[in-house]
Image: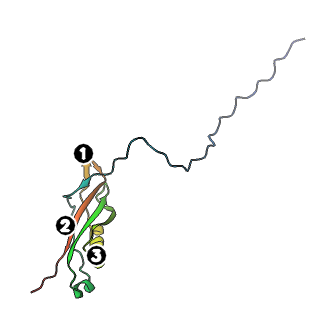
Amino acid sequence: MARSSPPRSSPPAARVNTLRRRRNPVYCNHPLKPPPLLLNPRYRRPPSPPVYPLSAIRLNQQGTVLVQAKISTAGDVIELGVHQSSGHPLLDAAALAAVRRWAFVPATRNNQPVEAWVRVPVHFVLNTR
């Protein structure tokens, strides 16, 4: 009597990776390099002047706000804040609103656009004649 060989089993099914994504942070041994800081940014178009708040005019408020903004690879403002206040919240807010609308020439590294931080002064001066 001929012996029949045992039936061949089908190849094992491909294993699917069922590991869940870890929610724990991943640490690296080297610090991440922040985007460069440009102190003399270039503009795609001339920046529009800030709107001087009427209440600041009535209160005779003047000053300079130093705004720090993160510029995208397309030249748009993607993050901003007051680096140095004028001492007047109305002027600080008006400076942020103005810089948010500005368009910059993006910084480049190895001829490729990169994100970068810029610091720009925004001046508020009343003409007293």
Tell me the number on the disc at residue 23: none
Pick the quarter of the image with the C terminus: bottom left
- Judging depth in this view, the residue of 127 and 60 nearest the camera is 60
**Number of residues whose C-alpha sits closer than 10 Å to that of mark 1, classed few (under 14), some (14–19) or many (20 or more):** few
Please name the residue that numbered disc 3 is placed on: 94
Which residue is at a point 26% across and 75% down the rendered structure image?
87
Q: Earlier in the sequence, mark 2 or mark 3?
A: 2
Please name the residue that numbered disc 2 is placed on: 46
**Number of residues whose C-alpha sits closer than 10 Å to that of mark 3, classed few (under 14), some (14–19) or many (20 or more):** some
Q: Position of residue 31 (x, y in %)?
A: 37, 45
Please name the residue that numbered disc 1 is placed on: 111
Q: Position of residue 58 (x, y in %)?
A: 23, 88
Q: Earlier in the sequence, mark 3 or mark 1?
A: 3
Task: Check disc 1 and report its element: helix, strand or loop.
Answer: loop
Q: Quadrant of residue 111?
A: top left
Q: Position of residue 128 (x, y in %)?
A: 12, 85
* Amino acid at pointer 3: Ala
The extreme front residue here reads 87
The extreme bottom residue here reads 58
Task: Check disc 3 and report its element: helix, strand or loop.
Answer: helix
The correct choice, above or below, for 64 with respect to 74 in the image is below
Give the side of residue 113 with respect to residue 22, left or right. Answer: left
Query: Mark 3 touching mark 1, by CB under 8 A?
Result: no
